[in-house]
Image (spheres, rainbow, N blue to C red):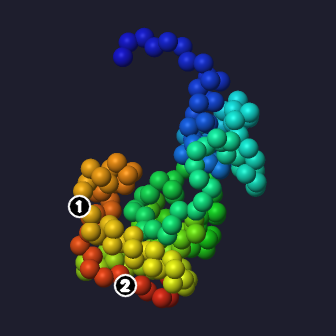
């Protein structure tokens, strides 16, 4: 690569914080430090450098003032293994109830496919004998179950990988898991520890 120009550390930390919050906000300095593998002091410096671009989101979290992201929760959906929504946080408490995190993230670091309802992980799912099996942590309401079935139908019926990529969906993760599924099997019991 040859000789590189010097990097303005303050500007680089500011840009890192800005980009992190664009994809992971609201978040705190500890979240940024963990995600970027930088010191907490560096994360705080990056967040401080963009203090005029952020707003308080409560619980020591901030978000970009003009993030362009809707405040509306996403519809219920099935997320693939290692989905980015689960990565980059010091704590996943806002996404996953404490006592259930082990079923989502195993002790050896495997992130299982999850069920997202009302902006939180509501269970895990797997492909078993050609069928999608939902393993919710508790009861999933009729509206959420209907939305999940519609999402599954969309995954199963689509074969247009270019369109999926244009919509921001990884066709490899989603189609290998759901395309051949014929029915949705909902397990109406919490996952045992």
Q: Residue at x 23, y 73 (%)?
A: 180
Q: Does the image show residue 39? A: no
Mark 1, Cα crowd under 10 Å, few <14 / some 14-19 / many 20+, is: few
Picture coordinates of residue 102 (x, y %)? 53, 70
Name the front one of labels 2 and 1.
1
Q: Quadrant of residue 3?
A: top left
Up/down of 136 relative to 84, above or below: below
**Where's the N terminus, which quadrant?**
top left
Q: Answer left or right for 123 relative to 11.
A: left
Picture coordinates of residue 184 (x, y %)? 35, 81
Q: Answer left or right for 19 relative to 59.
A: left
Q: Residue at x 27, y 68 (%)?
A: 157
**Label 2, label 1: how far apart the Cα atoms are:** 22 Å
Q: Residue at x 62, y 70 (%)?
A: 98
Mark 2 lies on residue: 185
Q: Secondary structure at mark 2?
A: strand
Relative to the observer, which residue lies in front, 15 or 53?
53
Picture coordinates of residue 94 (x, y %)? 64, 63
Mark 1 lies on residue: 159
Up/down of 114 relative to 164, above or below: below
Relative to the observer, which residue lies in front, 109 or 157?
157
Q: Answer left or right for 91 relative to 177.
A: right
């Amino acid at each position: 690569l040859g000789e590189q120009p010097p990097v303005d550390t303050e500007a680089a930390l500011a840009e890192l914080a800005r980009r992190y919050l664009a994809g992971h906000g609201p978040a705190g300095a500890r979240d940024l430090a963990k995600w970027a593998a930088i010191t907490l002091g560096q994360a705080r410096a990056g967040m401080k450098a963009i203090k005029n671009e952020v707003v308080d989101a409560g619980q020591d979290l901030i978000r970009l003032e003009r993030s362009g992201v809707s405040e509306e929760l996403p519809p219920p959906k099935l997320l693939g293994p290692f989905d980015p929504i689960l990565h980059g946080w010091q704590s996943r408490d806002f996404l996953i109830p404490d006592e259930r995190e082990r079923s989502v993230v195993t002790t050896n670091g495997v992130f299982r496919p999850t069920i997202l309802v009302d902006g939180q992980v509501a269970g895990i799912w797997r492909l078993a004998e050609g069928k999608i099996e939902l393993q919710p942590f508790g009861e999933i309401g009729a509206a959420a179950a209907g939305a999940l079935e519609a999402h599954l139908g969309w995954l199963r019926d689509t074969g247009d990988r270019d369109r999926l990529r244009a919509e921001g969906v990884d066709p490899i993760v989603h189609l290998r898991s759901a395309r051949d599924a014929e029915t949705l099997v909902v397990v109406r019991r919490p996952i045992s520890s």
